[in-house]
Image: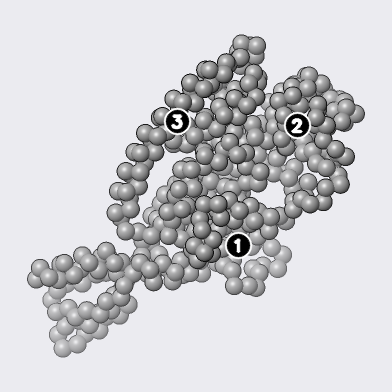
Amino acid sequence: MKTLVIHPYLKNDHSGRRSPQARLDEGVRLTHAISLDVRMAQLVPLTLYRPATLIGQGKADELKIIIDQQEIGLVVVDGSLSPVQQRNLEKVWECKVIDRTALILEIFGARARTYEGKLQVELAALEYQKSRLVRSWTHLERQRGGFGFLGGPGESQIEIDRRLIRDRIARIKRELESVTRTRELHRKTRREVPYPIVALVGYTNAGKSTLFNRLTGAKVKAMDKLFATLDPTLRNVKLPSGLHIILSDTVGFISDLPHELVAAFRATLEEVVEADLLLHVRDASHPDTGAQKADVLGVLSGLIPEEKLSEYMVEVLNKIDQLPDGAPDTNVIAVSALTGAGIAHLLATLDARLSALFMTTLSLKLPAEEGEKLAWLYRHGSVISQEEEEGSLQIRVRLTHENAARWAKMARKH
Ligand code: GTP
Protein backbone atom coordinates (compact mmCIF):
# COMPACT_ATOMS: atom_id res chain seq x y z
CA MET A 1 0.00 0.00 0.00
CA LYS A 2 1.33 3.44 -0.91
CA THR A 3 2.15 5.14 2.34
CA LEU A 4 3.04 8.60 3.55
CA VAL A 5 4.87 8.93 6.86
CA ILE A 6 4.73 12.20 8.75
CA HIS A 7 6.32 13.27 11.99
CA PRO A 8 4.52 16.19 13.63
CA TYR A 9 6.51 18.08 16.26
CA LEU A 10 6.38 21.38 18.08
CA LYS A 11 8.70 23.95 16.55
CA ASN A 12 9.42 25.68 19.82
CA ASP A 13 9.94 22.59 21.89
CA HIS A 14 13.65 22.16 22.34
CA SER A 15 13.41 19.71 25.19
CA GLY A 16 13.50 16.68 22.92
CA ARG A 17 16.65 14.62 23.06
CA ARG A 18 16.18 13.44 19.50
CA SER A 19 16.22 15.44 16.35
CA PRO A 20 12.87 15.41 14.53
CA GLN A 21 14.66 14.10 11.44
CA ALA A 22 15.97 11.08 13.34
CA ARG A 23 12.47 10.44 14.63
CA LEU A 24 11.07 10.63 11.13
CA ASP A 25 13.73 8.21 9.89
CA GLU A 26 12.77 5.80 12.65
CA GLY A 27 9.11 6.15 11.70
CA VAL A 28 9.99 5.27 8.12
CA ARG A 29 11.99 2.22 9.22
CA LEU A 30 9.11 1.10 11.42
CA THR A 31 6.77 1.43 8.47
CA HIS A 32 9.14 -0.52 6.23
CA ALA A 33 9.21 -3.22 8.88
CA ILE A 34 5.76 -4.36 7.82
CA SER A 35 6.56 -4.07 4.14
CA LEU A 36 4.51 -0.97 3.47
CA ASP A 37 5.48 0.99 0.39
CA VAL A 38 6.72 4.31 1.78
CA ARG A 39 6.36 6.88 -1.00
CA MET A 40 7.15 9.95 0.99
CA ALA A 41 8.21 11.10 4.43
CA GLN A 42 7.65 14.59 5.80
CA LEU A 43 8.42 16.55 8.91
CA VAL A 44 5.45 18.61 10.06
CA PRO A 45 6.57 21.48 12.31
CA LEU A 46 3.71 22.92 14.36
CA THR A 47 3.21 25.85 16.68
CA LEU A 48 0.63 23.94 18.70
CA TYR A 49 -1.28 20.66 18.69
CA ARG A 50 -4.92 21.08 17.67
CA PRO A 51 -7.48 18.95 19.47
CA ALA A 52 -9.56 18.31 16.36
CA THR A 53 -6.94 17.39 13.78
CA LEU A 54 -3.58 17.62 15.57
CA ILE A 55 -2.11 19.63 12.70
CA GLY A 56 -3.55 22.88 11.34
CA GLN A 57 -6.09 23.02 8.53
CA GLY A 58 -3.64 24.65 6.11
CA LYS A 59 -1.06 21.94 6.59
CA ALA A 60 -3.71 19.23 6.36
CA ASP A 61 -4.89 20.66 3.02
CA GLU A 62 -1.33 20.87 1.77
CA LEU A 63 -0.80 17.21 2.58
CA LYS A 64 -4.09 16.34 0.93
CA ILE A 65 -2.65 17.51 -2.40
CA ILE A 66 0.34 15.20 -1.99
CA ILE A 67 -1.92 12.35 -0.95
CA ASP A 68 -4.01 12.74 -4.09
CA GLN A 69 -1.05 13.21 -6.40
CA GLN A 70 0.79 10.19 -5.06
CA GLU A 71 -2.34 8.07 -4.66
CA ILE A 72 -1.50 7.51 -1.01
CA GLY A 73 -3.71 4.94 0.70
CA LEU A 74 -2.31 5.16 4.20
CA VAL A 75 -0.82 7.95 6.32
CA VAL A 76 1.29 6.93 9.27
CA VAL A 77 1.43 9.69 11.85
CA ASP A 78 4.55 9.17 13.91
CA GLY A 79 2.97 10.48 17.06
CA SER A 80 -0.10 9.93 19.12
CA LEU A 81 -3.59 10.56 17.76
CA SER A 82 -6.82 10.67 19.71
CA PRO A 83 -9.69 8.69 18.13
CA VAL A 84 -11.30 12.01 17.13
CA GLN A 85 -8.16 13.37 15.48
CA GLN A 86 -7.72 10.13 13.62
CA ARG A 87 -11.27 10.12 12.32
CA ASN A 88 -11.11 13.78 11.30
CA LEU A 89 -7.84 13.35 9.44
CA GLU A 90 -9.26 10.32 7.62
CA LYS A 91 -12.15 12.51 6.51
CA VAL A 92 -9.92 15.33 5.28
CA TRP A 93 -7.45 13.06 3.52
CA GLU A 94 -9.90 10.39 2.39
CA CYS A 95 -7.50 7.61 3.27
CA LYS A 96 -6.54 5.45 6.21
CA VAL A 97 -4.64 7.08 9.06
CA ILE A 98 -2.86 5.30 11.87
CA ASP A 99 -0.70 6.53 14.70
CA ARG A 100 2.54 5.23 16.12
CA THR A 101 0.90 2.90 18.63
CA ALA A 102 -1.18 1.18 15.97
CA LEU A 103 1.89 0.89 13.76
CA ILE A 104 3.94 -0.76 16.50
CA LEU A 105 1.05 -3.08 17.32
CA GLU A 106 0.92 -4.11 13.68
CA ILE A 107 4.65 -4.78 13.66
CA PHE A 108 4.49 -6.83 16.81
CA GLY A 109 1.52 -8.73 15.44
CA ALA A 110 3.41 -9.55 12.28
CA ARG A 111 6.59 -10.54 14.11
CA ALA A 112 5.40 -12.48 17.16
CA ARG A 113 6.53 -16.04 16.75
CA THR A 114 5.62 -17.95 19.87
CA TYR A 115 2.06 -18.65 20.91
CA GLU A 116 2.63 -16.61 24.04
CA GLY A 117 4.01 -13.70 22.05
CA LYS A 118 1.00 -13.76 19.76
CA LEU A 119 -1.42 -13.81 22.68
CA GLN A 120 0.40 -10.93 24.37
CA VAL A 121 0.22 -8.80 21.24
CA GLU A 122 -3.40 -9.60 20.65
CA LEU A 123 -4.19 -8.64 24.21
CA ALA A 124 -2.34 -5.36 23.80
CA ALA A 125 -4.19 -4.64 20.56
CA LEU A 126 -7.56 -5.35 22.17
CA GLU A 127 -6.80 -3.05 25.07
CA TYR A 128 -5.84 -0.31 22.61
CA GLN A 129 -8.97 -0.95 20.63
CA LYS A 130 -11.21 -0.93 23.67
CA SER A 131 -10.15 2.63 24.34
CA ARG A 132 -11.14 3.70 20.84
CA LEU A 133 -14.07 1.52 20.05
CA VAL A 134 -15.44 1.51 16.54
CA ARG A 135 -12.18 2.03 14.81
CA SER A 136 -11.69 0.89 11.29
CA TRP A 137 -8.56 -0.84 12.39
CA THR A 138 -9.11 -4.05 14.29
CA HIS A 139 -6.85 -6.77 15.38
CA LEU A 140 -9.65 -9.30 15.25
CA GLU A 141 -9.60 -8.79 11.52
CA ARG A 142 -6.12 -10.20 11.42
CA GLN A 143 -7.49 -13.67 11.94
CA ARG A 144 -9.02 -13.46 8.52
CA GLY A 145 -5.60 -12.65 7.16
CA GLY A 146 -3.78 -9.46 6.40
CA PHE A 147 -3.45 -6.29 8.35
CA GLY A 148 -6.63 -5.09 9.94
CA PHE A 149 -6.20 -1.50 9.01
CA LEU A 150 -5.62 -2.14 5.36
CA GLY A 151 -9.26 -2.70 4.63
CA GLY A 152 -11.13 -5.94 4.81
CA PRO A 153 -14.81 -6.59 4.74
CA GLY A 154 -17.02 -3.51 4.97
CA GLU A 155 -15.75 -1.17 7.62
CA SER A 156 -19.19 -0.42 8.89
CA GLN A 157 -19.55 -4.07 9.79
CA ILE A 158 -16.47 -3.96 11.93
CA GLU A 159 -18.33 -2.55 14.87
CA ILE A 160 -17.19 -4.85 17.54
CA ASP A 161 -19.11 -4.26 20.64
CA ARG A 162 -17.47 -3.66 23.96
CA ARG A 163 -18.72 -6.94 25.40
CA LEU A 164 -17.18 -8.97 22.62
CA ILE A 165 -13.83 -7.36 23.24
CA ARG A 166 -14.12 -7.78 26.97
CA ASP A 167 -14.94 -11.49 26.58
CA ARG A 168 -12.03 -11.97 24.29
CA ILE A 169 -9.67 -10.16 26.63
CA ALA A 170 -10.78 -12.40 29.49
CA ARG A 171 -10.27 -15.50 27.38
CA ILE A 172 -6.78 -14.45 26.29
CA LYS A 173 -5.80 -13.65 29.86
CA ARG A 174 -6.85 -17.12 31.01
CA GLU A 175 -4.98 -18.71 28.15
CA LEU A 176 -1.90 -16.63 28.92
CA GLU A 177 -1.92 -17.75 32.52
CA SER A 178 -1.76 -21.35 31.49
CA VAL A 179 0.89 -20.70 28.86
CA THR A 180 3.00 -18.81 31.39
CA ARG A 181 2.75 -21.75 33.81
CA THR A 182 3.99 -24.15 31.14
CA ARG A 183 6.85 -21.84 30.30
CA GLU A 184 7.84 -21.67 33.97
CA LEU A 185 8.22 -25.45 33.92
CA HIS A 186 10.34 -25.30 30.78
CA ARG A 187 12.53 -22.66 32.29
CA LYS A 188 13.11 -24.76 35.39
CA THR A 189 14.29 -27.61 33.18
CA ARG A 190 16.64 -25.29 31.40
CA ARG A 191 17.93 -23.84 34.66
CA GLU A 192 19.09 -27.31 35.62
CA VAL A 193 21.58 -27.04 32.79
CA PRO A 194 24.08 -24.98 34.71
CA TYR A 195 25.12 -22.71 31.90
CA PRO A 196 25.27 -19.00 32.46
CA ILE A 197 22.71 -17.07 30.45
CA VAL A 198 23.87 -13.99 28.59
CA ALA A 199 21.12 -11.77 27.20
CA LEU A 200 21.64 -9.28 24.40
CA VAL A 201 19.67 -6.10 24.89
CA GLY A 202 19.69 -2.86 23.00
CA TYR A 203 17.81 -0.30 21.04
CA THR A 204 16.14 -1.51 17.91
CA ASN A 205 18.49 -1.74 14.93
CA ALA A 206 21.58 -1.61 17.16
CA GLY A 207 22.79 -4.86 15.63
CA LYS A 208 21.81 -7.44 18.25
CA SER A 209 20.82 -10.13 15.76
CA THR A 210 23.96 -9.54 13.71
CA LEU A 211 26.09 -9.85 16.84
CA PHE A 212 24.12 -12.89 17.93
CA ASN A 213 24.85 -14.52 14.60
CA ARG A 214 28.48 -13.50 14.75
CA LEU A 215 28.87 -15.03 18.22
CA THR A 216 26.91 -18.20 17.54
CA GLY A 217 27.72 -18.71 13.90
CA ALA A 218 23.98 -19.16 13.48
CA LYS A 219 21.92 -17.97 10.60
CA VAL A 220 19.19 -16.24 12.51
CA LYS A 221 17.28 -13.59 10.67
CA ALA A 222 19.20 -10.35 10.66
CA MET A 223 17.75 -7.71 8.49
CA ASP A 224 17.50 -4.03 8.24
CA LYS A 225 14.03 -4.26 9.57
CA LEU A 226 12.95 -3.59 13.06
CA PHE A 227 11.81 -6.23 15.45
CA ALA A 228 13.13 -9.25 13.67
CA THR A 229 13.29 -10.68 17.12
CA LEU A 230 10.18 -10.27 19.18
CA ASP A 231 10.54 -13.59 20.88
CA PRO A 232 13.68 -14.65 22.64
CA THR A 233 16.04 -16.80 20.67
CA LEU A 234 18.44 -18.99 22.56
CA ARG A 235 21.73 -20.48 21.40
CA ASN A 236 24.59 -22.28 22.96
CA VAL A 237 28.03 -20.71 22.62
CA LYS A 238 31.36 -22.16 23.75
CA LEU A 239 33.78 -19.55 25.05
CA PRO A 240 37.56 -19.89 24.58
CA SER A 241 37.96 -21.31 28.12
CA GLY A 242 35.55 -24.12 27.31
CA LEU A 243 32.74 -22.56 29.31
CA HIS A 244 29.39 -22.97 27.61
CA ILE A 245 26.96 -20.11 27.79
CA ILE A 246 23.42 -19.66 26.57
CA LEU A 247 23.10 -16.55 24.47
CA SER A 248 19.67 -15.00 24.31
CA ASP A 249 18.64 -12.49 21.66
CA THR A 250 15.84 -10.17 22.69
CA VAL A 251 13.50 -7.71 21.09
CA GLY A 252 14.79 -4.21 20.43
CA PHE A 253 13.82 -1.38 22.71
CA ILE A 254 12.16 1.67 21.32
CA SER A 255 11.30 5.14 22.50
CA ASP A 256 7.70 5.98 23.38
CA LEU A 257 6.74 2.35 23.63
CA PRO A 258 2.96 2.29 23.91
CA HIS A 259 2.11 1.37 27.48
CA GLU A 260 -0.40 -1.16 26.18
CA LEU A 261 2.53 -3.11 24.86
CA VAL A 262 4.65 -3.35 27.91
CA ALA A 263 3.05 -6.63 28.97
CA ALA A 264 3.69 -8.01 25.51
CA PHE A 265 7.37 -7.80 26.32
CA ARG A 266 7.15 -9.91 29.40
CA ALA A 267 8.40 -13.08 27.74
CA THR A 268 11.51 -11.28 26.60
CA LEU A 269 12.02 -9.22 29.69
CA GLU A 270 11.75 -12.18 32.04
CA GLU A 271 14.59 -13.67 30.09
CA VAL A 272 16.55 -10.51 30.77
CA VAL A 273 15.78 -10.50 34.48
CA GLU A 274 16.97 -14.09 34.77
CA ALA A 275 20.18 -13.58 32.83
CA ASP A 276 23.54 -13.86 34.52
CA LEU A 277 24.96 -11.12 32.33
CA LEU A 278 23.47 -8.49 30.05
CA LEU A 279 25.23 -7.32 26.93
CA HIS A 280 23.95 -3.88 26.07
CA VAL A 281 24.54 -3.54 22.34
CA ARG A 282 24.71 0.07 21.17
CA ASP A 283 24.86 1.53 17.70
CA ALA A 284 27.89 3.76 18.20
CA SER A 285 27.41 5.28 14.76
CA HIS A 286 23.87 6.58 15.41
CA PRO A 287 23.53 10.31 16.08
CA ASP A 288 21.07 9.59 18.92
CA THR A 289 23.10 6.84 20.52
CA GLY A 290 23.05 8.66 23.88
CA ALA A 291 19.27 9.03 23.91
CA GLN A 292 18.87 5.42 22.85
CA LYS A 293 21.05 4.30 25.73
CA ALA A 294 18.94 6.34 28.14
CA ASP A 295 15.80 4.67 26.79
CA VAL A 296 17.16 1.19 27.24
CA LEU A 297 18.43 1.90 30.74
CA GLY A 298 15.11 3.54 31.61
CA VAL A 299 13.17 0.40 30.74
CA LEU A 300 15.66 -1.93 32.38
CA SER A 301 15.83 0.05 35.61
CA GLY A 302 12.11 -0.51 36.02
CA LEU A 303 12.78 -4.24 36.07
CA ILE A 304 16.10 -4.69 37.75
CA PRO A 305 17.45 -2.99 40.88
CA GLU A 306 20.02 -0.39 39.93
CA GLU A 307 22.95 -1.90 41.87
CA LYS A 308 22.41 -5.20 40.14
CA LEU A 309 22.04 -3.55 36.76
CA SER A 310 25.40 -1.79 36.84
CA GLU A 311 27.02 -4.92 38.19
CA TYR A 312 25.94 -7.28 35.49
CA MET A 313 25.66 -5.16 32.41
CA VAL A 314 28.46 -5.01 29.87
CA GLU A 315 28.23 -2.28 27.27
CA VAL A 316 29.22 -3.14 23.72
CA LEU A 317 29.69 -0.34 21.19
CA ASN A 318 28.75 -1.79 17.82
CA LYS A 319 29.15 -0.59 14.23
CA ILE A 320 32.59 0.89 14.85
CA ASP A 321 33.33 0.26 11.17
CA GLN A 322 31.02 3.23 10.58
CA LEU A 323 32.97 5.60 12.81
CA PRO A 324 35.39 7.85 10.96
CA ASP A 325 38.00 7.58 13.71
CA GLY A 326 37.56 3.87 14.35
CA ALA A 327 37.03 2.51 17.83
CA PRO A 328 36.59 5.10 20.57
CA ASP A 329 39.54 5.12 22.90
CA THR A 330 37.77 4.29 26.13
CA ASN A 331 37.30 1.35 28.41
CA VAL A 332 34.21 0.14 26.65
CA ILE A 333 34.21 -2.84 24.37
CA ALA A 334 34.03 -1.76 20.76
CA VAL A 335 33.08 -4.16 17.99
CA SER A 336 31.75 -4.44 14.51
CA ALA A 337 29.32 -7.32 14.35
CA LEU A 338 29.46 -6.91 10.59
CA THR A 339 33.22 -7.21 10.06
CA GLY A 340 34.09 -9.19 13.19
CA ALA A 341 36.43 -6.52 14.56
CA GLY A 342 36.72 -6.63 18.35
CA ILE A 343 34.77 -9.88 18.69
CA ALA A 344 37.73 -11.79 20.17
CA HIS A 345 38.07 -9.10 22.83
CA LEU A 346 34.35 -9.34 23.59
CA LEU A 347 34.53 -13.12 23.96
CA ALA A 348 37.57 -12.82 26.23
CA THR A 349 35.72 -10.29 28.38
CA LEU A 350 32.72 -12.58 28.68
CA ASP A 351 35.03 -15.40 29.56
CA ALA A 352 36.78 -13.42 32.27
CA ARG A 353 33.50 -12.21 33.80
CA LEU A 354 31.76 -15.57 33.72
CA SER A 355 34.56 -18.02 34.33
CA ALA A 356 35.17 -16.50 37.72
CA LEU A 357 31.55 -17.15 38.64
CA PHE A 358 30.93 -20.42 36.92
CA MET A 359 34.24 -22.22 36.79
CA THR A 360 36.67 -23.65 39.21
CA THR A 361 40.30 -24.61 38.69
CA LEU A 362 41.46 -28.03 39.84
CA SER A 363 44.98 -29.42 40.17
CA LEU A 364 44.89 -33.15 39.60
CA LYS A 365 47.23 -36.06 39.52
CA LEU A 366 46.31 -38.83 37.08
CA PRO A 367 48.09 -42.14 36.54
CA ALA A 368 49.43 -42.06 32.98
CA GLU A 369 47.33 -45.02 31.89
CA GLU A 370 44.06 -43.24 32.69
CA GLY A 371 43.63 -42.13 29.08
CA GLU A 372 39.86 -42.19 29.27
CA LYS A 373 39.71 -39.85 32.24
CA LEU A 374 42.15 -37.52 30.57
CA ALA A 375 39.94 -37.47 27.49
CA TRP A 376 36.94 -36.69 29.72
CA LEU A 377 38.75 -33.69 31.15
CA TYR A 378 39.60 -32.40 27.70
CA ARG A 379 36.02 -32.86 26.59
CA HIS A 380 34.40 -31.21 29.57
CA GLY A 381 36.87 -28.57 30.61
CA SER A 382 39.71 -26.41 29.59
CA VAL A 383 43.10 -27.92 30.39
CA ILE A 384 45.51 -25.18 31.41
CA SER A 385 48.62 -27.31 31.79
CA GLN A 386 49.66 -30.93 31.63
CA GLU A 387 53.03 -32.21 32.82
CA GLU A 388 54.42 -35.70 33.17
CA GLU A 389 55.94 -36.56 36.50
CA GLU A 390 57.24 -39.99 37.43
CA GLY A 391 54.70 -41.97 35.44
CA SER A 392 51.72 -39.79 36.34
CA LEU A 393 50.24 -36.64 34.91
CA GLN A 394 50.04 -33.35 36.74
CA ILE A 395 47.08 -31.47 35.35
CA ARG A 396 45.55 -28.09 35.93
CA VAL A 397 42.08 -27.82 34.49
CA ARG A 398 39.17 -25.40 34.60
CA LEU A 399 35.76 -26.99 34.98
CA THR A 400 32.28 -25.69 35.56
CA HIS A 401 31.11 -26.28 39.12
CA GLU A 402 28.78 -28.95 37.83
CA ASN A 403 31.51 -30.81 35.95
CA ALA A 404 33.82 -30.50 38.92
CA ALA A 405 31.16 -32.24 41.00
CA ARG A 406 30.80 -34.94 38.35
CA TRP A 407 34.54 -35.39 38.35
CA ALA A 408 34.61 -35.75 42.11
CA LYS A 409 31.89 -38.40 41.92
CA MET A 410 33.77 -40.29 39.20
CA ALA A 411 37.00 -40.11 41.18
CA ARG A 412 35.27 -41.49 44.29
CA LYS A 413 34.04 -44.52 42.37
CA HIS A 414 37.55 -45.70 41.68
P1 GTP B 1 15.92 -5.35 16.09
O1 GTP B 1 15.59 -6.76 15.73
O2 GTP B 1 15.09 -4.34 15.42
O3 GTP B 1 15.98 -5.12 17.56
O4 GTP B 1 17.38 -5.02 15.50
P2 GTP B 1 18.78 -5.63 15.89
O5 GTP B 1 19.35 -4.86 17.03
O6 GTP B 1 18.72 -7.10 16.06
O7 GTP B 1 19.64 -5.23 14.60
P3 GTP B 1 20.13 -6.14 13.36
O8 GTP B 1 21.16 -7.13 13.81
O9 GTP B 1 18.97 -6.63 12.62
O10 GTP B 1 20.94 -5.03 12.53
C1 GTP B 1 20.32 -3.86 12.05
C2 GTP B 1 21.08 -3.33 10.87
O11 GTP B 1 22.38 -2.89 11.25
C3 GTP B 1 21.32 -4.37 9.77
O12 GTP B 1 21.20 -3.73 8.53
C4 GTP B 1 22.74 -4.82 10.00
O13 GTP B 1 23.36 -5.28 8.83
C5 GTP B 1 23.38 -3.53 10.49
N1 GTP B 1 24.56 -3.80 11.33
C6 GTP B 1 24.64 -4.61 12.40
N2 GTP B 1 25.89 -4.60 12.92
C7 GTP B 1 26.62 -3.76 12.16
C8 GTP B 1 27.99 -3.31 12.21
O14 GTP B 1 28.81 -3.70 13.04
N3 GTP B 1 28.36 -2.41 11.23
C9 GTP B 1 27.49 -1.95 10.30
N4 GTP B 1 27.96 -1.08 9.41
N5 GTP B 1 26.21 -2.35 10.24
C10 GTP B 1 25.77 -3.24 11.15
Instruction: Describe the element under mark 3 as helix, strand or loop.
Output: helix
> Vertically, is 341 above or below 99?
below
Give the amino acid type for the residue marked by disc 3 in the picture. Lys
Instruction: Describe the element under mark 2 as helix, strand or loop.
Output: strand
Q: Position of residue 159 (x, y in %)?
A: 61, 14
Eye-nearest disc, 2 or 3: 3
Q: Is residue 149 visible?
A: no
Taking the spot 14% from the left edge, 79% from the top edge, the residue there is 367
Taking the spot 72% from the left edge, 65% from the top edge, the residue there is 324
> Vertically, is 175 above or below 201?
above
Q: Which residue is labeled 3 in the image? A: 173
Residue 327, image quadrant: bottom right
Instruction: Tell how many labels.
Output: 3
Q: Which residue is labeled 2 in the image? A: 4
Eye-nearest disc, 1 or 3: 3
Q: Position of residue 157 (x, y in %)?
A: 61, 11
- How far apart are the alpha carbons under marks 2 and 1? 33 Å
Q: Which residue is labeled 1 in the image? A: 317
Is 350 situated left or right of 413 in this image? right
Q: Residue furthest bottom?
A: 390
Give the amino acid type for the residue marked by disc 1 in the picture. Leu
Q: Residues within 10 Å of mark 1 (few under 14, many from 20)?
A: many
Give the amino acid type for the residue marked by disc 2 in the picture. Leu
Is 407 situated left or right of 249 in this image? left
Q: 67 and 232: which one is in front?
A: 232
Lower position in the chain sequence, tag 2 or tag 1: 2
Q: Position of residue 64 (x, y in %)?
A: 84, 25
Is 75 situated left or right of 382 in this image? right
Q: 260 and 45: which one is in front?
A: 260
Residue 403, image quadrant: bottom left
Ligand 1 within 8 Å of disc 2? The answer is: no
Instruction: Describe the element under mark 1 as helix, strand or loop.
Output: strand
